[in-house]
Amino acid sequence: MRYEGDIYRPPSEAYSYILQVTIGCAHNKCTFCGSFKAKKFRMRHLDEIFEDLRMARRYYRKVGRIFLADGDALVCKNSFLLAILKEIEDLFPECERVTIYGRAKDILRKTDEELLELKAHNLKMIYMGVESGNPEILRRINKGETREEMIAAVRKSEGLGIPTSLTFLSGIGGREMWRENAIDTGTIISEMEPSYASFLTLMIVPGTPLHEQYMRGEFELLRPDEVLKEAELMLENINLKKTCVFRSNHASNYVSLKGDLPQDKEAMIQSLRVAQQHSEWWKDERYRRL
């Protein structure tokens, strides 16, 4: 297996085989993200990808899950992705699922038939970074997608039976817009009705535009207690009819939180309220990670 540059994958793909089908991120302009700044986006050649798959087959006795990297591999044409998925089916008949990073525009660009074709060849979930439900925050972080586009994309994917796993960032609005971030993130989750949602906590990465804003005093980080207050307000504004698995137990979070929405909503809110009064429960900054 060969990899170019640093490789990033969702926490839930910790035990998956990571297959790099693209290099970098096609957008690569978000102000907070430093993951792919050293890479120029390109698609790998299929023969290289197939060679990696054959190497993995020789090395691993069993591969239950495969994750397609890098940043937004779903941007690739369906013919390219289908060739990879079919090769996986041939080489790894035991593979239970294939998952992928994607952006809202990737989902909206594909027809229903194209997405269903990917699903038919074992694409079981799309991971998407939403970050915030607030339109102004999305503009400030140069997300390149609107609230409306992301809602439409998630509802389209979920409606076709392809679950989505979404990430949101506590603190991405800074101290100036923490309340707007909390409320609008809660309401966008309600409108999207995703299968999975995760709330991470912002950590500023050196070398990013957001880091430059922070150093100039143009962006203020939230204190740990304010992060917990923001998460509480966000949960208060989530109103779902279908079950959504919710997690806020990433290495970046000050307090670990998990449950199913709407069933565990009140219990998680109560946990956050108690945690705000107990600083000894908060994760030490030395142990927080991206």
Image (spheres, rainbow, N blue to C red):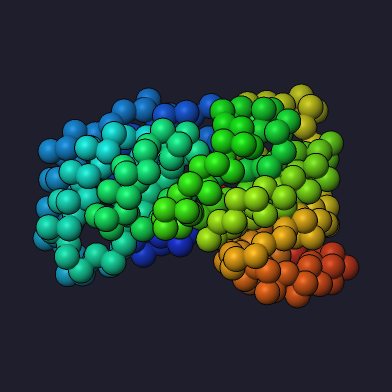
Q: Position of residue 172 (x, y in %)?
A: 70, 41
- Is any atom of residue 9 visible in this view? no
Kindly identify the residue that appears in the image at 47 percent across and 28 percent down. Answer: 27
Image: 87 above or below 64? above
User: Relative to the observer, which residue lies in front, 163 or 5?
Assistant: 163
From what the image shows, is residue 41 above or below residue 222? above
Number of marks in picture: 0
- What's the residue at 37%, 43% (across, down)? 112
Which one is in front, 92 or 252? 92
| Quarter of the image where one finds residue 249 | bottom right
Residue 80 placement (x, y as % from top left): 22, 37
Q: Quadrant of residue 92?
A: bottom left
Which image quarter: residue 248?
bottom right
Furthest residue to the right? 277
Left or right, residue 14 beside residue 175: left
* Residue at image coords 84%, 36%: 176
Could you say which is closer to the camera, residue 264 or residue 40? Answer: 264
Lateral position of residue 12 relative to residue 15, left or right:
right
Q: Measured along the vertical axis of the image, is residue 246 above or below residue 22?
A: below
Q: Nearer the viewer, residue 64 or 32?
A: 64
Residue 81 visible in the current orientation: yes
Write the residue at 72% across / 38% down.
134
Q: Position of residue 257 (x, y in %)?
A: 67, 68
On the image, the x and y values in percent for residue 48 come to 16, 39
